[in-house]
């Protein structure tokens, strides 16, 4: 069955997560304005006291994200002090899902294709009561490889650059990952991982997230973990709908301007062609792990070792 939703008919609430980047926020907000949602939630973190000039940037960003000039219920949740990315996003989403049953979520550097909003709205409606589906993401990192003859496929991997979900999924979210030791010790990863290497990778990463020893404090990893504990699938489009425009060196996590995921091109998803069956695309998931998680992890580790060796050499020469 083919169908489509025009951006001007968007009834699904939209939530934006913002901080201190007025320029990229304005570009993302322009797409939200084009979609004209009837409800808009803006969640903003506060400035860091040790960053001169950041308070002004935070104020400019909030101004850029609240220029609503269409019929819309605008609600804001702005922190007076800096909370940090992980607790700000987690608490902000809790606030959003206290008020609405479902929402489309964009961070300040996630620039969507206009068709992203209709794609999310249609799939939120279609899978609203299907417990097998936990979220809908707009990112596609298959490098042009088509995974399905339809408009989207099902994955165990959640991509956080532009997504949508329901309150029913949020209720299972545990940002502290309190159940991780039990899930780990009872071999829960064996029900998810497609290889021993993958199980090792995620065990190491989740151990770091749970203990707080990770260099990357992210809400997205606990969200992924929560989905796995519920055997929930994420819907991913067969074309990329989100371009991350925040790889400028000032973001919290996306700091490498030469990153191969920076500024990915986007495409129109077109009329939505739904698959008849709900099942995970194992081949796509294996590609995602091997190319986008494991390989990138090894590359980052190699670069870190090189930097340490260069630093040691410089100190020895001095």
Image (cartoon, grey):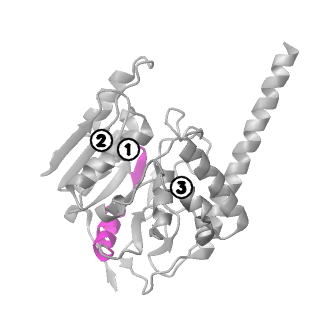
Residue that carries the numbered disc 2 in the rendered image: 43
Which of the two labelled residues, at mark 2 and mark 1, occupies the earlier sequence position?
2
Residue 69, how many percent across, how many down? 16, 45
Is residue 31 shown to the viewer in this render? yes
Residue range (magenta) = 108-127
Q: Are marks 3 and 1 in contact (CB under 8 Å)?
A: no
Residue that carries the numbered disc 3 in the rendered image: 180
Query: Up-down: is 304 above or below 274?
Result: above
Q: Secondary structure at mark 1?
A: helix
Which residue appears at 28% of the width and 40% of the height? 65
Query: Up-down: is 203 above or below 66?
Result: below
Q: Are marks 2 and 1 in contact (CB under 8 Å)?
A: yes
Residue 116, how many percent across, how many down? 36, 62
Residue that carries the numbered disc 1 in the rendered image: 89
CA gap, disc 3 to disc 1? 21 Å
Residue 79, how many percent across, how many down? 29, 32
Q: Please tell me how crowded label 3 is: few (under 14), some (14-19), or many (20+) other residues with Cα within 10 Å.
A: many
Q: Please tell me how crowded label 2 is: few (under 14), some (14-19), or many (20+) other residues with Cα within 10 Å.
A: many
Which residue appears at 64% of the width and 56% of the height? 203
Which of the two labelled residues, at mark 2 and mark 3, occupies the earlier sequence position?
2
Query: Which residue is more in the foreground, 227 or 247?
Result: 227
Residue occupying the far right of the picture? 317
Q: Secondary structure at mark 3?
A: helix
CA gap, disc 2 to disc 1? 8 Å
Q: Is residue 203 left or right of residue 246?
A: right
Which residue appears at 37% of the width and 29% of the height? 82
Name the quadrant containing residue 118.
Answer: bottom left
Query: Which residue is more in the foreground, 186 or 41?
Result: 186
């Amino acid at each position: 069955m083919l169908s489509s939703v025009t951006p001007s008919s968007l009834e699904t609430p939209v939530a934006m997560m913002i901080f201190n980047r007025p320029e990229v926020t304005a570009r993302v907000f322009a797409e939200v304005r084009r979609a004209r949602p009837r409800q808009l939630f803006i969640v903003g973190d506060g400035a860091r006291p040790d960053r001169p000039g950041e308070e002004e940037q935070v104020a400019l960003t909030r101004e850029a994200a609240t220029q609503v000039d269409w019929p819309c219920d605008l609600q804001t949740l702005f922190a007076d002090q800096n909370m940090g990315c992980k607790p700000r996003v987690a608490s902000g989403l809790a606030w959003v899902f206290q008020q609405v049953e479902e929402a489309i979520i964009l961070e300040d550097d996630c620039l969507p294709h206009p068709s992203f909003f209709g794609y999310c709205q249609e799939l939120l409606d279609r899978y609203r009561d299907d417990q097998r589906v936990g979220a809908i993401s707009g990112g596609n990192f298959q490098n042009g490889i088509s995974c399905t003859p339809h408009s989207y496929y099902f994955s165990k991997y959640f991509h956080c650059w532009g997504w949508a979900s329901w309150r029913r999924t949020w209720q299972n979210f545990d940002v502290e990952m309190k159940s991780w030791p039990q899930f780990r010790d009872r071999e829960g990863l064996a029900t998810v991982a497609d290889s021993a290497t993958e199980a090792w990778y995620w065990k190491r990463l989740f151990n770091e997230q749970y203990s707080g020893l990770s260099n990357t404090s992210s809400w997205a990893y606990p969200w992924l973990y929560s989905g796995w504990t519920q055997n929930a699938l994420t819907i991913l489009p067969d074309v990329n709908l989100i371009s991350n425009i925040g790889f400028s060196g000032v973001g919290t996590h996306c700091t490498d301007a030469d990153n191969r995921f920076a500024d990915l091109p986007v495409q129109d998803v077109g009329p939505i062609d739904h698959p008849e069956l709900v099942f995970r695309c194992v081949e796509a998931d294996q590609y995602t792990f091997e190319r986008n998680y494991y390989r990138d992890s090894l590359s980052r580790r190699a670069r870190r070792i090189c930097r340490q060796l260069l630093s040691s050499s410089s100190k020895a020469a001095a």
